[in-house]
Structures are given as C-alpha cells and as structure tokens.
Amino acid sequence: PPHQLVEDILGKVPLPARVMLRLDVQSPSDFALRSKAQLDELKSRARALSNLKIEGLLTGYSRDGKLDLETLLEIIDAAPATHYTIHNVIEFTDDPLAALRSLSGFPQVDRAMVPCGTGTLAERMKRIPAYEAALGPQRRLVLGGLELDMLSTLRRETEIRSYHLGKAVRTPQNPSGKVDQSKVEMAHKLLFL
C-alpha cells in the first residue's frame, strides 16, 4: 500500500500491523520478481516502512518452484530490525514443507501465512503439525484461506491463534472487495467472545 495510507491507518488503529511488501502483481498466484529495479523498489519501501511503527512486513517471492531466498535476504538486509511474515508464496512452491524449512536461516522471519494446502478444513487442520514442524520452533503459522464459519472450529480444535481473513471480511469476497465492518465484527465475536 502507499506509504501515506499506512501512516494514516497506524494513526487511527491501535493494533500491531504487518504491511504487505509486494509489487506488480499480475494475479493472486504471481510471486515472481521481474527486474533489478523491482528489487531496488522493494528494498526502498522496506526501509521506509520499517521507520514507521509497524510490527513487520509480509513478503515473499519464488523462482523456479522454490522460495527466492536471495531476494528475501536482500529485502531483510534493507530493513534488518523488522519482523517478517512470508505469505502464500509458500503454497505455490513445488514443496511447501521444504519452503518452510528453508526459512530456518532467517531469524527475522517469525511467521508464515499459509492455508495448509487445499481441501476441507479437517484435511487442512491435519496438516498443521507438519507445517509447524517444518517452520520450526519460535515461529508461528498464520492460517489463511479461511471463511468466517471456520473460525469457531479452528479456535476450539487447534492451537493456531493467528489468522488472515482477507476475502472473508470483504464484500464482495475478493481481494478488491471493501472491508465489511459487520464481517470484521462477526470475526471478532467468533474469535474472542
């Protein structure tokens, strides 16, 4: 998002914020970096955003079916005091568990946002232990690809307490939909009441 928008939100919402760091998205599954200029822009934005009172950045790119660890290292080097969440790119690699294990050399990466594969919620929940083991200790999974009706089950049957609701709290339910306050309130009730 634009720098000013992040500043405005941080000024109004007293919540820990992690800001998406991604450029030139062609589709929701597009995680390719196209040029050195793009990398330079990402590094510049990472530095600028890290000077705000954010909790961290969400990022992640892939190359040839694997996480692009060289790009990740360059981004982290640009803002080394920042925490990082690697987002859904993990599920678009050839081996998501190997991708999670490859993050072990990056102490700034403390979270990974994943839906834990495809299938029913029960099938995805069965994969959580393998994903957590691959990510390693002292790191947290942020479960994505959720619908509001999944939250009570997740809260009751798993130890996962970090969720990305994205489309679930938008109307219409797509990435460009507007965040719907009533859906956010419903999510809050399902998670905290």
Image (cartoon, rainbow, N blue to C red):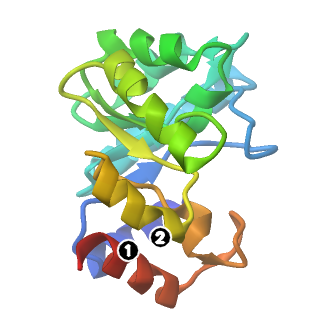
Residue 155 pos. (x, y %): 31, 58
- Amino acid at dot 1: Ile
In this picture, residue 186 sits left or right of residue 159: right
Give the SS element for disc 1: helix
In this picture, residue 119 sits left or right of residue 183: right
Q: Quadrant of residue 187?
A: bottom left
In this picture, residue 4 sits left or right of residue 76: right
Q: Nearer the viewer, residue 129 or 185?
A: 129
Q: Residue at x 43, y 10 (%)?
A: 102
Circle 2 residues within 10 Å: few <14, some 14–19, many ≥20: few
Q: Residue at x 22, y 74 (%)?
A: 14
Q: Quadrant of the N terminus?
A: bottom right
- Amino acid at dot 2: Leu
Q: Which residue is mark 2?
A: 5
Give the SS element for disc 2: helix
Farthest residue to the bottom: give it. Answer: 182
Q: Residue at x 24, y 74 (%)?
A: 192
Q: Are marks 1 and 2 in contact (CB under 8 Å)?
A: yes
Residue 186 makes an appearance in the image: yes
